[in-house]
């Protein structure tokens, strides 16, 4: 660390610079850096998801991070500066642009723009970053990755059932068999409840959305919390108050009865739902769709993994029919030390109106989205085999003992790389002790050493750092260390690659 001059207060940096002048290095709130281990683990997970999606016949597509704000949907705030919930800016012709907040709205734009050239139904998957201009908190980020799969142009409930079964196969492939359930509900049923309590029509759109978001929090806040959110509002433990939907007690109880309609058998659940939406043609149509999905799931032998559950709502307004949520069922400990279920790692549903915003004819669509970071956390908790050896092995380091013979060391590292061994030559200016410390920090399995004596003999020394670290715990004196030189041996240059491979094989 640089020491400040006692008379000037300068820190030894740029001329005239004081410590107060320096920028503070910090990552913005709600964002995070990712290291090589997390990147490698995420890539292995994404590769496994791609395998399942492609097995089902879905193909990759990529849309830009930025879209015209109006293309993202009517559910965005209508303000002079529409940046509540999304990050927005104006381009040179004063049109508003926004960073995408999910991968579904951009897909709707893409399909509409390329409608005539695409096969229908159109089956695609996408992965990428999304950004939301929301208050960050523990486990809540402004930037996160999603992995989506969608079928556009199929109105059949078979498309919804297939998406759910594919989600189940994906979680099985990732090593989560028996530790999850894919829950299915239908927004038409909730729309029927809305009709029954007098919240139909465009004028009540805002209150309907508040009701949706309240029910969507059932797992987090419980029935009492949902009741508060359906009524005047709820104060959370931090002191933040969330305004409620303003429903009467009778209206709220009917909504809660809908969310708690699951029974011991499927037929009893359907009967309870039909009772809640009695008199609503739309609600009864939603129950009929759930019956069809349940039959298809049963036929595919997925009934244990994909289940009808009226508590699932999904908060976004664009869903128009079946909605899905993949929930992990194994226990974790919350901030208070209380065991709880891990919870949702993804969801989706049918959004028949989103693509149709751009076209004269209706275009049905359904899809599923995985929260990549949350799913990755779950896989680590269960030690999923898909993440085994996710991080690439650290490089072999070729030490530079003689600055005048750098070309010789470059030749050694080129030989290793040519044989497919990950390797690097030390590029700093430090001596051997600091180079060894560098290799330790890089977690290198071994280093290559060649001084003038080894060069004259046509040899290199290979030091196995992992075995050396183990041996060092058993050697008590410096003299013993010098005599033993644990895990360090000489080989001819021609045998270097084979010897390095043997060392690497010991530590895989």
Image (tube, rainbow, N blue to C red):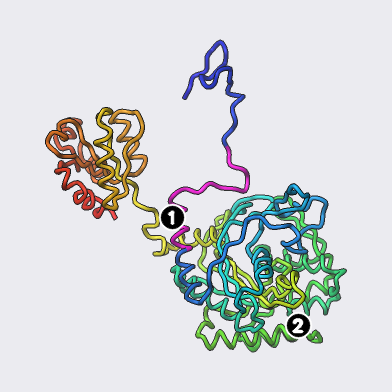
Of all residues, the one furthest to the right in this rendering is: 203
Q: Is mark 1 on a helix, strand or loop?
A: helix
Nearest to the observer: residue 113 or residue 105 = 113
Between discs 2 and 1, the one toward the N terminus: 1
- The residue that label 1 is drawn on is 40
Give how far across and how far down residue 425 sits, in percent.
31, 39
- Relative to 316, is 3 on the left or the right? left
Mark 2 and mark 1: Cα distance apart in space: 46 Å
- Relative to 25, is 174 on the left or the right? left
Judge whether residue 34 is colored magenta.
yes
- Where residue 85 sits, quadrant-wise, is bottom right
Give how far across and how far down residue 174 sits, in percent.
45, 68
Q: Residue at x 24, y 36 (%)?
A: 408
- Where residue 125 sits, quadrant-wise, is bottom right
Q: Can see residue 106?
A: yes
Give how far across and how far down residue 162 sits, in percent.
56, 80
Q: Can see residue 469?
A: no
Nearest to the observer: residue 394 or residue 466 = 394
Of all residues, the one furthest to the top in this rendering is: 7
Residues drawn in magenta: 26-46
Q: Is mark 2 on a helix, strand or loop?
A: helix
């Amino acid at each position: 660390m640089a020491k400040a001059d006692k008379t000037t207060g300068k820190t030894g940096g740029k001329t005239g610079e004081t410590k107060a002048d320096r920028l503070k290095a910090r990552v913005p709130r709600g964002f995070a850096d990712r290291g090589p281990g997390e990147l490698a683990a995420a890539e292995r997970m994404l590769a496994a998801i791609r395998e399942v999606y492609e097995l089902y016949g879905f193909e990759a597509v990529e849309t830009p991070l930025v879209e015209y704000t109006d293309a993202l949907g009517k559910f965005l705030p209508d303000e002079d500066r529409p940046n509540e919930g999304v990050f927005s800016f104006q381009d040179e012709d004063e049109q508003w642009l926004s960073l995408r907040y999910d991968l579904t709205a951009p897909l709707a734009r893409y399909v509409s723009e390329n409608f005539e050239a695409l096969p229908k139904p159109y089956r695609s998957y996408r992965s990428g970053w999304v950004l939301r201009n929301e208050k960050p908190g523990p486990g809540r980020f402004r930037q996160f990755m999603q992995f989506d799969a969608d079928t556009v142009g199929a109105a059949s409930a078979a498309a919804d059932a297939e998406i759910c079964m594919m989600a189940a196969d994906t979680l099985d492939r990732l090593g989560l068999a028996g530790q999850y359930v894919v829950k299915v509900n239908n927004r038409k049923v909730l729309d029927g409840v809305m009709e029954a309590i007098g919240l139909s029509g465009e004028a009540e759109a805002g209150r309907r959305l508040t009701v949706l978001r309240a029910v969507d929090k059932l797992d987090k806040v419980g029935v009492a919390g949902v009741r508060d959110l359906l009524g005047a509002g709820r104060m959370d433990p931090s002191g933040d108050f969330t305004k409620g939907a303003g429903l009467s007690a009778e209206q709220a109880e009917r909504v809660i009865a809908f969310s708690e309609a699951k029974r011991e058998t499927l037929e009893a659940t359907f009967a309870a739902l039909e009772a809640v939406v009695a008199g609503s043609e739309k609600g009864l149509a939603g129950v009929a769709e759930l019956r069809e999905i349940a039959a298809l799931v049963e036929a595919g032998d997925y009934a244990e993994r994909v289940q009808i559950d009226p508590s699932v709502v999904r908060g976004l307004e664009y869903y128009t029919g079946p909605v899905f949520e993949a929930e992990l069922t194994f226990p974790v400990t919350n901030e208070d030390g209380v065991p709880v279920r891990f919870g949702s790692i993804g969801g989706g549903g049918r959004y028949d109106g989103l693509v149709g915003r751009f076209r004269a004819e209706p275009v049905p669509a359904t899809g599923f989205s995985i929260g990549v970071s949350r799913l990755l956390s779950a896989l680590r908790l269960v030690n999923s085999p898909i993440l085994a050896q996710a991080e690439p092995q650290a490089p072999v380091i070729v030490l530079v003992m003689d600055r005048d013979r750098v070309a010789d060391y470059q030749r050694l590292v080129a030989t290793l790389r040519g044989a497919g061994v990950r390797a690097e030559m030390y590029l700093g200016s430090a001596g051997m002790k600091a180079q060894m410390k560098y290799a330790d920090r890089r977690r290198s399995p071994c280093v290559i050493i060649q001084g003038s004596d080894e060069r004259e003999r046509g040899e290199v020394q290979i030091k196995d750092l992992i075995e050396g670290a183990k041996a060092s715990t058993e050697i008590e004196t410096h003299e013993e260390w010098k005599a033993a030189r644990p895990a360090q041996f000489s080989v001819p240059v021609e045998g270097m690659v084979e010897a390095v491979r043997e060392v690497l094989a010991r530590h895989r």
